[in-house]
């Protein structure tokens, strides 16, 4: 599985209809830290296929979704439980092999 691109028009629908935990990356393609985070989340998406939905959204500093979740910079990653409630916000780059993997694995746990 790979990251699925979403935008303002389909963000809420994708998150609310997921019926599983969701990880959303707000990124600016071409920015080194965002590109590194995309690569890291691609690995996470493969490892957690069918357990967590991984989405990416182009960061828009004026965007409604960004305002609703208080996303102020890219990369920022939101982790939402299967009810769509925010569990964790990660600002900046984290390598999937490091602490970030622990957070994602915890999100995929059956009681998450």
Image (spheres, rainbow, N blue to C red):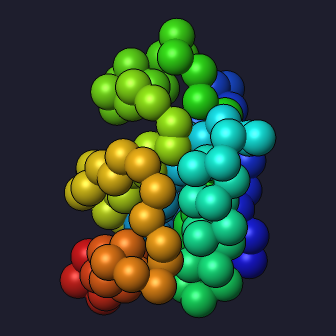
The reply to whether residue 109 is in sight is yes
Furthest toward the front, the residue is 32
Q: Nearer the viewer, residue 60 or 30?
A: 30
Which residue is at a point 48% across and 72% down the rendered structure image? 95
In front of the other: 24 or 95: 95
Q: Position of residue 107 (x, y in %)?
A: 33, 75
Q: Please tell me whether residue 41 is drawn above or below residue 77 in the rendered image.
A: below
Instruction: Point out the image quarter for the C terminus.
Output: bottom left
| Residue 39 coordinates in the image, percent (x, y) | 68, 67
- What residue appears at the point 46 percent right and 56 percent down from the top-left corner? 93
Where in the figure is residue 30, as x and y percent of width and height? 76, 41
Q: Quadrant of the N terminus?
A: bottom right
In the image: residue 67, left or right of residue 65: left
Q: Residue at x 61, y 54 (%)?
A: 55
Q: Residue at x 30, y 49 (%)?
A: 89
Residue 36 occupies which quadrant of the picture?
bottom right
Please, is residue 8 above or below residue 49 in the view?
Answer: above
Residue 13 in view:
no
């Amino acid at each position: 599985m790979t990251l699925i691109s979403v935008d303002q028009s389909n963000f809420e629908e994708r998150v609310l209809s997921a019926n599983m935990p969701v990880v959303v990356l707000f990124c600016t393609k071409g920015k080194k830290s965002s590109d590194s985070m995309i690569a890291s989340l691609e690995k996470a998406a493969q490892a957690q296929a069918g357990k967590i939905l991984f989405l990416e959204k182009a960061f828009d500093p004026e965007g409604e979704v960004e305002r609703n979740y208080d996303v102020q910079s890219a990369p920022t990653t939101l982790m939402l439980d299967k009810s769509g409630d925010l569990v964790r916000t990660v600002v900046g780059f984290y390598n999937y092999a490091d602490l970030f993997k622990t957070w994602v694995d915890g999100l995929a746990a059956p009681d998450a």
